[in-house]
Amino acid sequence: MIISVSANGEEMGFLPAEGVTVLFDKALAAGAEEVAKAYPLIRRELERNLQLEVDFSPTVILIKREKGLSKHGPEPPDHGVRGPRE
């Protein structure tokens, strides 16, 4: 299920899925669905490789680089990672 929400005056999509929530720019809807579909497998692989239970539900944010990320040095980052809230 995709629900539109407003973030900073721009329309974004919100896709709650099995174990993950994906927020995304409308142009990235297909990518958001791919992330949601792939997450259960990624989670199982993390648990197997790290031998730890993933007991949190991450939020993945997909944004278009040219309007969403600020520059950190000469080249903007290709991705961002944030751990669970404590």
Image (tube, rainbow, N blue to C red):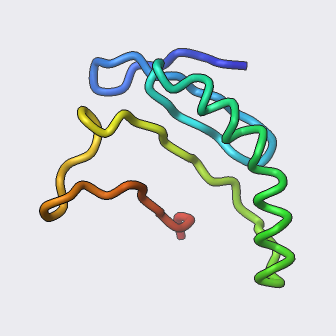
At x 46%, y 20%, the residue is 27
Q: Quadrant of residue 43?
A: bottom right
Question: Quarter-wise, where is residue 76 in the image?
Answer: bottom left
Q: Residue at x 36, y 33 (%)?
A: 64
Query: In the shown orientation, is residue 17 left or right of residue 23?
Result: right
Give above or below for 77 relative to 10. Answer: below
- The residue lying toward the viewer, choosing from 4 and 70, is 70
Image coordinates for residue 15, horizontal then vertical, percent: 65, 29
Name the spot of residue 54 as percent of width and height, x first.
Answer: 76, 68
In screen coordinates, is 28 left or right of 35? Answer: left
Q: Residue at x 44, y 26 (%)?
A: 25
Instruction: In the rendered view, tell whether residue 13 sits above or below residue 84.
Output: above
Q: Residue furthest front?
A: 75
Q: Is residue 50 left or right of residue 78?
A: right
**Residue 60, image x and y in percent?**
55, 46
Q: Which quadrant of the figure has residue 41?
A: bottom right
Q: Quadrant of the C terminus?
A: bottom right
Q: Is 14 displayed left or right of 56 in the figure?
A: left
Q: Position of residue 10 (x, y in %)?
A: 32, 19
Reply above or below: 17 against 73.
Answer: above
Residue at (13, 61) in percent of width and height = 74
Q: Is residue 59 above or below residue 79?
A: above
